[in-house]
Image: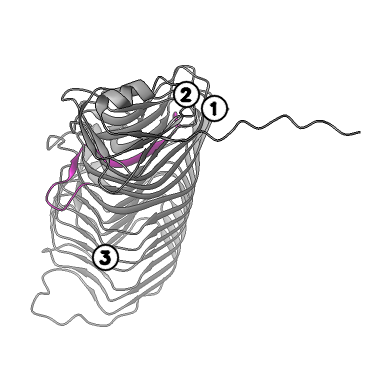
């Protein structure tokens, strides 16, 4: 039996937009879903895209500069933003979405240069959809006044310059994602608040499921008051309810303030690879933190922290398979090189752990605790099946031990030096310790 094929609608030519008035008019036309922006349009009010509409650059240099005090583009369903500069005040949202529809469809953000926050939230009626990012450079943003924040482990987390957050409390609500080429901030001019944040609705709530989260250069400063115990931020933060196949940090990630974690995982990640240096300058600003489930961590460039209590790497909760590092250096009092409180299968540091500080306060699970800048600390409940450290396990602070073993280690091998106390004038001695 043959069925008559319905006639196809003729293709619709895109509208070329050269003025704000043209833009506002074209957005209301039902038969012109594809709008091409020519040049940089100034004084643009907040835009509300209808389902299926797209804004694209007609040529290099195209963009929208929004009115002071105004948000930028509000997305709803099956929208695309391609090749544009989207310029809002740093403390406003350059891109955001409505929660009035149950499904986002597919949102596509590609080759964008942005000032202001990019915020995609699932709340209200919104329960599903897909977010695709392929090239997003957020030059400046300030999210410190965003009062809604993920919470867990005794702290709240500042939203990021890019935030994808499924806030639904029902675990059947899923936002899928593919996130590539995300960058935020500049050296010496970080975004304020967090850098990149992906989160679900808590440990039992709605989920974000991403095949990949890939970042370029990230510079962030939470501007959190020193001594605050219940607030943190992250350069790249995968929070609870976020499930990611691969996290890849292709550019440097730098944080500048108190409690500004460089990389932090509360969620579930199969593989996390960092290919460029990870650096923090603030107190209690840890290089890499795992509280979630992480199968394999591979940091291929140095971790260096400069603040008081700014540990290099710690596992206080969750599950971790193997962790591989290039080199870990901490400078502050209380800044432990590596601290482990949960079982992990394997720890490898290729070019050594070195700490230069003494004893001082550090943020631990929402409270301040006194720690010594031990090179490797295995706490009660912590167990490492295999430890291999090349390049030495060195502590420079007076009376600071290179190793604290209150938990367990299966096999333990250190080459290139195993030295505690001031050794600035000494050559590191080669040593191998076995347990």
N-terminal of the pair, mark 1 or mark 2, is: 2
Q: Secondary structure at mark 1?
A: loop
Q: Which residues are magenta?
A: 185-202
Asked whether residue 153 appears in the rendered view, the answer is: no
Residue ID at (25%, 59%): 337
What kind of colouring is applied to the model shown? Answer: one colour
Q: Nearer the viewer, mark 3 or mark 2?
A: 2
- Residue 242 image point, x, y percent: 46, 39
The relative height of residue 181 versus residue 20 in the rendered view (above or below) is below
Alpha-carbon distance for marks 1 and 2? 7 Å
- Residues under numbered marks 1 and 2 in contact, where contact means CB atoms less than 8 Å apart: yes
x then y, percent, for residue 69 = 17, 22
Residue 310 visible in image: yes
Q: Would you place residue 146 above or below residue 327 in this image?
A: above
Mark 3 or mark 2, earlier in chain: 2
Where residue 310 appears, as percent x and y from the top left, is: 20, 51
**Which numbered marker is on residue 309?**
none
The location of residue 236, given as percent across then percent down, is 32, 46
Q: Which residue is mark 2?
A: 168
- Say if the magenta span includes residue 29: no
Earlier residue among tags 1 and 3 = 1
Q: Residue at x 30, y 66 (%)?
A: 301
Q: Which mark is residue 302?
A: 3
> Which quadrant is the N terminus positioned in?
top right
Mark 2: secondary structure: loop
Nearer to us of marks 1 and 3 is 1
Relative depth, front residue between 147 and 211: 211
């Amino acid at each position: 039996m043959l069925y008559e094929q319905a006639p196809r609608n003729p293709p619709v030519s895109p509208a070329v937009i050269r003025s704000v008035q043209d833009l506002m008019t074209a957005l209301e036309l039902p038969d012109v879903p594809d709008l091409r922006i020519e040049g940089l349009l100034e004084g643009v009010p907040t835009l509300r895209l209808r389902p299926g509409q797209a804004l694209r650059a007609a040529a290099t240099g195209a963009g929208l500069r929004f009115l002071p005090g105004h948000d930028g583009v509000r997305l709803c369903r099956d929208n695309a933003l391609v090749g544009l500069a989207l310029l809002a005040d740093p403390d406003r949202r350059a891109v955001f979405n409505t929660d009035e529809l149950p499904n986002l469809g597919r949102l596509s953000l590609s080759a964008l240069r942005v000032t202001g926050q990019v915020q995609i939230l699932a709340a209200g009626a919104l329960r599903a959809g897909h977010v695709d990012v392929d090239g997003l450079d957020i030059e400046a943003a300030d999210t410190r006044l965003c009062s809604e924040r993920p919470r867990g482990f005794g702290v709240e987390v500042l939203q990021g310059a890019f935030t994808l957050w499924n806030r639904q409390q029902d675990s059947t609500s899923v936002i899928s994602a593919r996130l590539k080429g995300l960058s935020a901030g500049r050296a010496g001019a970080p975004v304020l608040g967090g850098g990149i944040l992906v989160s679900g609705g808590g440990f039992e709530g709605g989920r974000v499921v991403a095949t990949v989260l890939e970042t370029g250069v990230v510079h962030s400063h939470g501007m959190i008051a020193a001594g605050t115990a219940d607030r943190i931020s992250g350069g790249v933060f995968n929070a609870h309810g976020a499930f990611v196949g691969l996290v890849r940090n292709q550019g440097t990630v730098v944080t500048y303030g108190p409690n500004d974690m460089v990389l932090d995982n509360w969620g579930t990640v199969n593989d996390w690879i960092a290919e460029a240096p990870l650096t923090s300058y603030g107190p209690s600003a840890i290089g890499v933190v795992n509280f979630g489930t992480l199968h394999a961590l591979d940091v291929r460039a140095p971790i260096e922290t400069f603040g008081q209590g700014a540990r290099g790497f710690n596992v206080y909760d969750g599950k971790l398979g193997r962790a591989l590092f290039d080199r870990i250096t901490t400078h502050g009092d209380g800044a432990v090189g590596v601290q482990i409180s949960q079982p992990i299968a394997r720890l490898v540091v290729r070019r050594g752990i070195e700490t230069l500080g003494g004893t001082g306060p550090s943020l631990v699970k929402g409270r301040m605790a006194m720690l010594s800048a031990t090179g490797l600390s295995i706490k009660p409940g912590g167990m490492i099946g295999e430890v291999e450290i090349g390049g030495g396990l060195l502590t420079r602070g007076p009376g600071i031990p290179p190793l604290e073993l209150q938990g367990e280690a299966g096999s333990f091998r250190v080459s290139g030096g195993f030295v505690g106390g001031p050794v600035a004038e000494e050559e590191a001695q080669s040593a191998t310790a076995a347990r």
